[in-house]
């Protein structure tokens, strides 16, 4: 088969893709929040609309950039859910986590610098409440259902657009504005701006995201019992890492 190798994509390349993609994601979320706050001061609804629109469109593009290498997870909950279905080894999921967290933290610093702010400014925006906890459970659950439903139905190539659209919509239907990602939650602690979150609120958000991820695994197993490791290995973007089974081929 021309242009296709049976060798899996090396782990270091996938980690680099996750690091860079996570950095772009945090810079996108935080930078667009800062821009929205400056362009529409005092108009919270308009600020949120601008932030959500930029995030939805930008996430689509970022997944297309880095997805062919790593799958474009940029989210530890996605990576560990993928491992639960056999699409990614537990060892690789554990390796993805620090790359994702480091990328989101670095992206937050870059966003601050791009807007002439101090590189690190710890957020004072307190968000933890019962409603926010429930919102993050639902936001994360919905995100994983979108991703794995598309993988099971053979529509994985629509996932970048679907994930971007879902996150953009979830900015509005959840009171937490849908972080749905422990790595981005940590990154957003380092920017005392529109998109920031106070470190004291972070643990509740991360606990809710892990809860949503665990619920998603149970529900996905019930809804899609024939989800195979080969299908799981191609979330969020078909990338064929060669790990999921004897018939899986990889791209160098």
Image (cartoon, grey):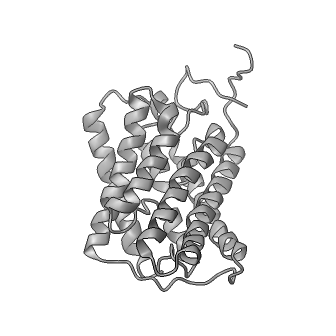
Residue 99 image-quadrant placement: bottom right
Q: How many marks?
A: 0
Quarter in which the C terminus is drawn: top right
> Which residue corresponds to the image point at 56% horizontal and 84% vertical from the top-left?
122
Figure check: 231 above or below 42: above
> Which residue corresponds to the image point at 66% horizontal and 70% vertical from the top-left?
111
Res. 124 in view:
yes
Nearer to me, 7 or 130:
130
Nearer to me, 8 or 147:
147
Instruction: Report whether 75 appears left or right of 113.
Output: left
Residue 246 image-quadrant placement: top right
Residue 3 location, x and y as percent? 74, 20
Instruction: Report whether 222 appears left or right of 238.
Output: left
Residue 87 location, x and y as percent? 49, 36
Q: Going by the picture, which residue comes out furthest to the bottom?
A: 124
> Which residue corresponds to the image point at 62% horizontal and 49% vertical from the top-left?
62
Instruction: Report whether 5 appears left or right of 198.
Output: right
Quarter in which the N terminus is drawn: top right
Residue 205 image-quadrant placement: bottom left
Q: Going by the picture, which residue comes out furthest to the top?
A: 1
Instruction: Report whether 139 appears left or right of 58.
Output: left
Nearer to me, 133 or 240:
133
Nearer to me, 133 or 41:
41
> Which residue corresponds to the image point at 25% horizontal and 37% vertical from the top-left?
222
Figure check: 117 above or below 173: below
Residue 12 location, x and y as percent? 71, 47
Residue 250 location, x and y as percent? 65, 28
Res. 211 in view:
no
């Amino acid at each position: 088969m021309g242009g296709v190798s049976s060798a899996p994509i090396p782990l270091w390349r996938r980690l680099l893709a996750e690091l860079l993609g996570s950095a772009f994601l945090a810079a996108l979320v935080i930078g667009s929040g800062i821009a929205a706050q400056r362009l529409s001061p005092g108009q919270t609804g308009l600020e949120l609309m601008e932030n959500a629109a930029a995030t939805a469109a930008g996430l689509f593009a970022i997944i297309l950039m880095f997805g062919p290498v790593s799958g474009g997870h940029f989210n530890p909950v996605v990576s560990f859910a993928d491992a639960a279905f056999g699409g990614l080894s537990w060892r690789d999921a554990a390796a993805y986590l620090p790359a994702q967290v480091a990328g989101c933290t670095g992206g937050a610093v870059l966003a601050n610098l791009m807007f002439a702010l101090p590189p690190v400014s710890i957020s004072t925006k307190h968000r933890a409440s019962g409603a926010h906890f429930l919102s993050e459970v639902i936001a994360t659950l919905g995100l994983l259902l979108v991703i794995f439903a598309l993988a099971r139905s053979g529509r994985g190539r629509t996932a970048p657009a679907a994930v971007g659209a879902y996150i953009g919509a979830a900015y509005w239907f959840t009171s937490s504005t849908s972080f749905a990602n422990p790595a981005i939650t940590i990154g957003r602690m380092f920017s005392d701006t529109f998109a920031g979150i106070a470190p004291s609120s972070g643990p509740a958000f991360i606990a809710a995201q892990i809860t949503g991820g665990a619920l998603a695994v149970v529900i996905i197993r019930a809804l899609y019992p024939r989800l195979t490791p080969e299908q799981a290995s191609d979330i969020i973007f078909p990338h064929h890492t060669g790990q999921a089974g004897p018939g899986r081929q990889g791209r160098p």
